Image (cartoon, grey):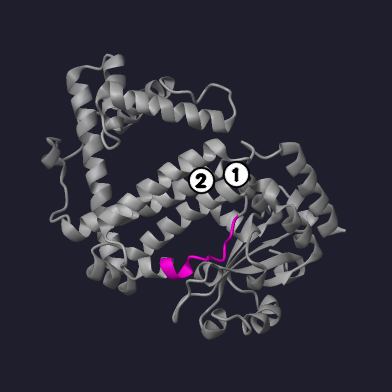
Amino acid sequence: MFPLEQHTIFLTLAGSQAHGTARDGSDVDLRGVCIAPLPIRLSLFRAFEQYEGALPELLAETVIPRMAGHPTASRALEVKTECVIFDIAKFVRLCAAANPNALEILFADKRDWVFATPVWQRLYDERRRFLTKKVQQTFHGYAMAQLKKIKTHRSWLLNPPTKKPYREDFGLPVAGGTLSRDDQNRIEQSIADKIRGYGIDNIDMPKTTRIAVHERLEAFYRDSLSATGDDLDERMRAIATNGLHLPPDVASALNSEKKYRAAMKHWDSYQTWKTHRNPTRAELERQHGYDTKHAMHLIRLMRMGLEVLETTDLPVRRDDADDLSAIRDGAMGFDELLAAATGLQKSMEKAVAMTSLPADVDPDGVDDLLLALLQDGTS
């Protein structure tokens, strides 16, 4: 490791402190960027991509006094401050891929900056070159991850698993299986390859085109197979299995093994959630029937993605902070949340077709910018 305080070019408040939704007891998270020294950057054995942990002491001496003047972070200075600091190469790569977390750092409101250098200012001045149509996929994807958590936890609240699954519940032998693990893995790989062959993964095309074609193919498969999103994978697996001409008993055993492993994974996840459940989140779920903090993040992410497409800017400090806080406090019922998410998804689909944003970043331009930043930061 190297002295981060000598190589950090930027630190900003993140999370609720940056969104304007912080309240008493909210964590203080810092996110930043550094330029790893050249010997580390070129080393075959000491690669560095990011630091995660407590705020380094020497950085704290600079940062804490500045946080003391912040309207919300100043109320939480006694809370242990955690930070993530990315090496600039990884950070720029994430921004170019429209990673929502990275873009939030890049577009952080200047009122939330706690440390910045001229090298950072140069990158900040070029921030809009990283806004592309890809935000429709990335922000929506992150939002759907929140929705998946909401639905999973809600199912555990309303209908918790009552017993651990056992192999015999799926018609499998108690000790071992009808197929060796090697045979299972080999056949599963063949099934996966067969399904992949139905797609476009091995066809060279721009990423945005790939995403659009994939969505149309998926819609075609759903319609032609009369499958919903939940059982499309199972229907595709059945087609691939049939295409490999597997004996019926082998196909049946494989499917039973797969269902058993999925049930065990679900059971283990439930046990982990129940054991390590955050008391505050548990109370939100008890009061409102679902995790409203996840709901707040879901709506925020989709609104931010939509705003990027419509305005070609990314406001991290939220004008709708009061509304988001109300969602966290249960202003939306579960069905209302689902309807809002569906509406925002449709709005994003319309906006991406009309936006002036490019499909992707200019790779040569981004490379040139990164090289210039590295030269400035290591000179």
The residue identified by callout 2 is 138
What is the x, y in percent for residue 368? 80, 43
347 displayed left or right of 253: right
What amino acid type should be assigned to the residue bearing mark 1?
Answer: Ala
Q: Residue at x 21, y 23 (%)?
A: 250
What is the x, y in percent for residue 171? 12, 35
The residue identified by callout 1 is 97
| Image height of 269 relative to 84, above or below | above
For mark 2, does the 10 Å Cα neighbourhood hold few (<14), some (14 to 19), or many (20 or more) residues?
Answer: some
For mark 1, does the 10 Å Cα neighbourhood hold few (<14), some (14 to 19), or many (20 or more) residues?
Answer: some
N-term mark: 2 or 1: 1
What amino acid type should be assigned to the residue bearing mark 2?
Answer: Thr
What is the x, y in percent for residue 308? 57, 50
Residue farthest to the right, as pictured: 379
What is the x, y in percent for residue 8? 72, 66
Q: Nearer the viewer, residue 255 or 312?
A: 312
Q: Are marks 2 and 1 in contact (CB under 8 Å)?
A: yes
Q: Quadrant of residue 279?
A: bottom left
Asked if residue 56 is among those painted magenta in the image, a careful observer would answer no
Q: Quadrant of residue 297?
A: bottom left
Residue 94 seen: yes
| Image height of 26 relative to 336, above or below | below
Kindly identify which numbered label has been placed on residue 32: none
Q: Main secondary structure of the magenta part?
A: loop
In what quadrant of the picture does the N terminus appear? bottom right
Measured in 3D between alpha carbons, the distance from the residue under mark 2 to the one under mark 1, in whole angstroms, is: 8 Å
Residue 269 seen: no
Q: Nearer the viewer, residue 350 or 236?
A: 350
Q: Residue at x 36, y 65 (%)?
A: 327
Residues in magenta, as a range = 314-323
Q: Nearer the viewer, residue 208 or 3?
A: 208
